[in-house]
Amino acid sequence: MSYKGLCMLIVSVLSLTAFNTNHTIVDGKKHGILNNTNANTTNLFTTVTTNSKPAIKNGHLNYGLSSDTPFTGILSHLLYTGNPDSLILQFFDESLLQSDENYTFNNEGAATYEMSDDNKTITLTIKDHVKWHDGAPVTGSDLEYAFLVIGNPDYTGVRYDKQMQMVKGMEEYHKGKVDYISGIKVDGKKISITFKEANPSILTGGVWTYPMHKEYLKDVAIGDLESSDKIRKTPIGFGPFQVKKIIPGEAVEFVSNDEYWQGKPQLGSISLKVINPDLAVKAIETGELDIVEISADQYDQAKNLQNIETLGYVGFAYSYIGFKLGHFDPISKTTKMDNPKMANINLRQALAYAIDNKAVGEKIYKGLRFPANTVIPAISHYHNSKIKGYSFNQQKSKRLLDDAGYIDTDGDGIREDLKGKKFTIYFASMNGDANSELLAQYYIQQWGDIGLDVQLVDGRLQEFNSFYDMVALDDPKIDIFQAAWQAGSDPDPSGIWDKNSDYNYTRWVNQTSQDLLAKGLSPKAFDKKYRKEVYDEWQQLVHDEVPMIPTLFRYNLAVANLRIKDFDYKFTDWSKVAVTAEDAVR
């Protein structure tokens, strides 16, 4: 499909919807973001509310969790996998260490830290008055317990990753040879964590800093934590708010944690409720909600409202189309690249060249998303801006398929496989905002234009939780899938790409990749120039092998009622957020 054809498709679809839109041009000015893959220097929006009126005491805030599906309710940093649950966690639990604007740990959080001279050991000291919501002090044993849970063979989560395995003694504990982790030492409120070798990621998020309330959870078997009431119904944290009531999948009521280590929060209570994305802007317009994240398809609706301000920033997220190249063996915790259907690199590259991500960003997402050229986000220091990415070139797609042997042998316009047999690619995509169906159909049409028969799995978009269950469990119905990653501030990509990672959803295994990932975590990588060179080479490898097609980088967007004060969307401290009136501005 041509650029013009995409525009026509968008017009026809939007005429059938409520013309929901997202974020694009501010104050009528273009900012050239679409031509700037090094987007970290560009900011179209403010990130902090500008309300300067006096705050009222113990005010109430209504927060919208924009989702077309109920939240799962796995309310533990160690166990959750979906973004909706993480949005709930932000109110009542937190990391012991905070980060500065460069995403490097500082000493402003609930704990301070020191590094050993050999850079192998980090020692955290938890500050006085840091207490769990039941009044018990947070101790080094609580953080140690988190490591013991993650490393336990019965652990049901996905945090046992490459970095966790680098902790001294962790592998022996994980294999059941010992009942302790030799690299972890606890002394009251102090805990030291020693790695096998110096690790440059330690100070950018490569060390686990979320404790678990050991005393509260001691009666729950580690294998049962994920399904337990103490995680799903009565979770305890040490953040600025505490959970008062949960309506499973729908809503959460929070009340102020008056004993919060940074001082009593400005707000007295918060109500969180799930709101369908199609209804989010209306809810903010009527004052039903005070804060809600919006997507690009909603921006045109929101930008003219007089009772809100729009906040946004280029985030660490990127969208992608992944290829299912194998499966993950849960017993050996190893990826097996054993699916031949999508193994041909020419086929994968042809699919990449067939789609016009620039047009998608401009026309579907109003310029608030822009082409992703690599799988390290554009705002990262380690982003390789020299890689051009897969720009739109369907003639090249067709040549690649011809050269590989995917030929239309019966003249019906659809290519057969390498053996001359019928060839259908099954594509999984999920429900989301108003653009989800449009985007999925656009991809299918573009691939059809190069002679490939691509069909939606089960003939429809998948519900969010079902989609990720299918992807994570390597459902054989899926050949390719469309998803997104919210990457962390730590530049190490092994949590997604290592062959032993559950999150390696494409199931791509490549020894050169493994070697480069190891180099990026080696002591030599404390030299940022060297580490940048390693990750530049790794990004080029991923581009060339194309186990996934990075499609779009994006702006994160939220709207806030004008009564909201001191809400920093990028670096949110909920203890500081306040309201300046009893009722929302309408």
Image: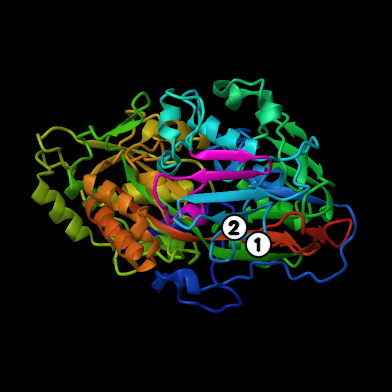
Residue 70: name its quadrant. Answer: top right
- Report the coloring of the rendering: rainbow
Q: Judge from the rendering whether residue 515 lies leftward or rightward of residue 141; answer left or right.
A: left
Which residue is situated farthest in the bottom direction here?
A: 29
The reply to whether residue 441 is in sight is no
Viewport quadrant of the N terminus: bottom left
Percent x, y of residue 52: 81, 71
Residue 537: name its quadrant. Answer: bottom left
- Based on the picture, tell me whether residue 205 belongs to the magenta stretch: yes
Residue type, label 1: Ala
Residue type, label 2: Gln
Q: Judge from the rendering whether residue 75 lies leftward or rightward of residue 404; answer left or right.
A: right
Is 15 rendered above or below residue 153?
A: below
Magenta stretch: give its range: 183-207
- Based on the picture, tell me whether residue 238 belongs to the magenta stretch: no
Q: For the image shown, how many numbered marks are present on the structure?
A: 2
Q: Which mark is residue 298?
A: 2
Is 376 rendered above or below residue 182?
A: below
Is 274 rendered above or below residue 402?
A: above
Percent x, y of residue 132: 75, 39
Determine crowd level at label 1: few under 14, some 14-19, many 20+ residues with C-alpha closer than 10 A.
Answer: many
Percent x, y of residue 73: 63, 33
Is 8 rendered above or below residue 507?
A: below
Q: Which mark is residue 302?
A: 1
Question: SS class of the residue under badge 1?
Answer: helix
Could you say which is closer to the camera, residue 331 or residue 567?
Answer: 331
Could you say which is closer to the camera, residue 220 or residue 378?
Answer: 220
Could you say which is closer to the camera, residue 330 or residue 474?
Answer: 330
Percent x, y of residue 486: 49, 51
